[in-house]
Amino acid sequence: SDLVRALPSDTRLVFYCSCPNDAASATFALRFRKAGFKNAIAIEGGSDAWSQAGLPVEAVGPLVVVDGAIPTPRQTGVA
C-alpha cells in the first residue's frame, strides 16, 4: 500500500500474534526486514507476554484487516 511505501526504512515495525511459536509475527518481521525495514521485529510471546512484563501499550490507530485476515507483505506492496 502507499502507506507502507511511504514509511522510512528505519521505522520501527513491531509484529505480534497469538499463534504457536509466534510463527506469523516472525514471518512478517523477516519479510519486512528483507524488504529493507531494518527495525522490523516480532515480540516473543505476543502481546500477552508484553503486557505481563508490565511494558507500555499505546493505541496508535486501527488494525487493518482484510476479509478477516491481516494483509500479507505482498498485499501491502512490501514482498
Image (cartoon, helix red, strand yellow):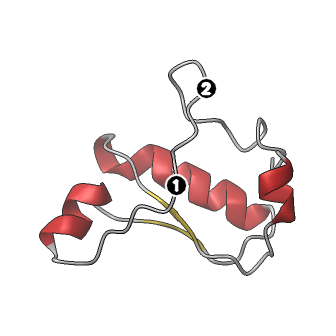
Task: Decide which of tag 1 and tag 2 comes sooner along the chain.
Answer: 1
Image-based side of 56 in relation to 65, left or right: left
Label 2 sits on residue = 66
Q: Give the x, y percent position of residue 13.
A: 59, 67
Q: CA distance from mark 1 to mark 2?
A: 16 Å
Q: Residues within 10 Å of mark 2 (few under 14, many from 20)?
A: few
Residue at x 72%, y 44% (from the top left corner)? 73
Image-based side of 64 in relation to 4, left or right: left
Assign a secondary structure to mark 1: loop
Assign a secondary structure to mark 2: loop
Label 1 sits on residue = 61
Q: Give the x, y percent position of residue 21.
A: 33, 50
Image-based side of 47 in relation to 48, left or right: right
Q: Which image quadrant: the N terminus?
A: top right
Q: Give the x, y percent position of residue 11.
A: 68, 76
Q: Give the x, y percent position of residue 19.
A: 33, 40
